[in-house]
Image (cartoon, helix red, strand yellow):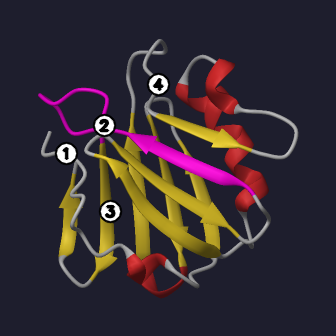
Amino acid sequence: MYGVRLDGDWSFFVGKQLTQVCIGPYDVQLHFEDNVSISIQGGDPREKCFCHTTACSSSSAVKGMPGKAVSLVSLLGASVLKVTAENTTTLALFFSNMEELRIYEIDDGYESFTVDGGPNGLITV
């Protein structure tokens, strides 16, 4: 919708532990310490709204939000080490358990994900 800001300060994620993963049919919510959260939307199972990479696999091959989102449970209790805007469509989070999560803007006409709890309030991508 608005793109990932390359000049944005995403450092408010660093050190935050993931405390809750909420999975719905068309969205997944990640709740971190200190009321920081990410809500990822994805209605079409063919859309690549995020990719979770572990030491042994990647969620990108799984279709549909609930099936893909199940892999995110392994991030519970892990803390964010680094966050980068890789480009205007990708936000990448690197966790203390050596796993990575890339969240994508999938359609510039609709909301793909939101980030809440940072110094700038609600960020819509």
* Secondary element type, mark 2: loop
Q: Main secondary structure of the magenta part?
A: loop
Total labels drawn: 4
| Secondary structure type for disc 1 | loop
Q: Earlier in the sequence, mark 1 or mark 4?
A: 1
- Mark 3 to mark 2 CA distance (whole Å): 12 Å
Residue for point 25% across, 51% down: 4
Rendered image: mark on residue 105 = 2
Disc 3 vs disc 1: which is toward the camera? Answer: 1
On screen, 32 above or below 42? below
Dots 1, 2 in contact, CB < 8 A? yes
Question: What's under tag 2, amino acid-wise?
Answer: Glu
Q: Which residue is mark 1?
A: 3
Evaluate if marks 3 and 2 touch, with contact meaning CB atoms under 8 Å apart. no
Q: Which residues are magenta?
A: 99-112
* Label 1 environment density (alpha carbons within 10 Å; few <14, some 14–19, many ≥20): many
Q: Which comes sooner in the sequence, label 4 or label 3?
A: 4
The x and y percentages for residue 104 are 39, 38
